[in-house]
Amino acid sequence: MRKKILLHACCGPCAEYPLQELLKSDADITVYYFNPNIHPIEEWKRRLAQLEYLTARLGLELIVDGTSEPDIWIDWEKQGKTNRCSMCYESRLGKTAAKAAELGMDAFLSTLQVSPYQDFDLITSIGNNYAEKYSLEYMASDFRSGFRQGQNMAREDGLYRQKYCGCAISLENSDFREKILRDLEGLAAQQ
Ligand code: SF4
């Protein structure tokens, strides 16, 4: 029987390389968009749109969770956490594992593991914990060597490539903050 895999995806560009690699295997792949951290909502929609384009091009099913709770990431210390990014990984991997179990899948993983800017070992550890909880396999996959290739693939696909991680604090800290805010204002005006 073919292995059923749920791939958590944070955006289209980060999904490019992992999907290229996963599609080499004889597995059923479903893509899952659950990114409540992304601020503001125009950015949440923009990242989803890129992923919709990519999954449609590849003929893959995309499941979208509409949760958008960026304020939790602004006030993250009120959640009693000591590490904002750990909270972020926990949130997304926990929900992905639960969805994979609900759908009767065998395994799950995340495009977060393509980015050299994320904490690969922490994501792996959190993924393994949720895999144990739900009796699934966590496919800790070191896609980082393909990060640049994936970004180039996204450029060729004409995808928008974001310049900040996603939460409001990462936007504030971005070197491109002013340009991003101008772009987002333009998007908001169109909606
Ligand atoms: S910097 Fe990125 S991983 Fe860390 S909390 Fe913000 S969105 Fe999540």
Image: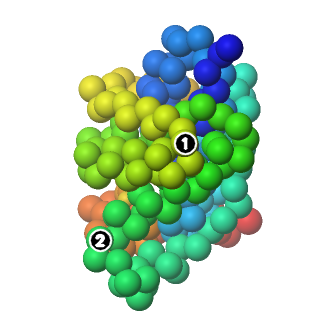
Q: Secondary structure at mark 1?
A: loop
Q: Amino acid at mark 1?
A: Ser
**Is 23 placed above or below 171 here?**
above
Q: How far from the left and from the top, in percent, is residue 178?
A: 37, 68
- Mark 1, other Cα within 10 Å: few <14 / some 14–19 / many ≥20: few
Which residue matches tag 1? 135
Could you say which is closer to the camera, residue 87 or residue 64?
A: 87
Mark 1 residue's CB less than 8 Å from ligand 1: no
Q: Residue at x 32, y 31 (%)?
A: 142
Q: Residue at x 73, y 65 (%)?
A: 191
The image quadrant where one finds ligand 1 is: bottom left
Q: Amino acid at mark 2?
A: Asn
- Mark 2, other Cα within 10 Å: few <14 / some 14–19 / many ≥20: few
**Is 36 placed above or below 51 here?**
below
Q: Residue at x 32, y 49 (%)?
A: 125
Q: Residue at x 50, y 79 (%)?
A: 72
Marker disc for residue 6: none
Could you say which is closer to the camera, residue 96 or residue 58?
A: 96
Coloring scheme of the render? Answer: rainbow
Q: How far from the left and from the top, in percent, is residue 75?
A: 43, 84
Q: How far from the left and from the top, in percent, is residue 27?
A: 61, 18
Which residue matches tag 2? 83
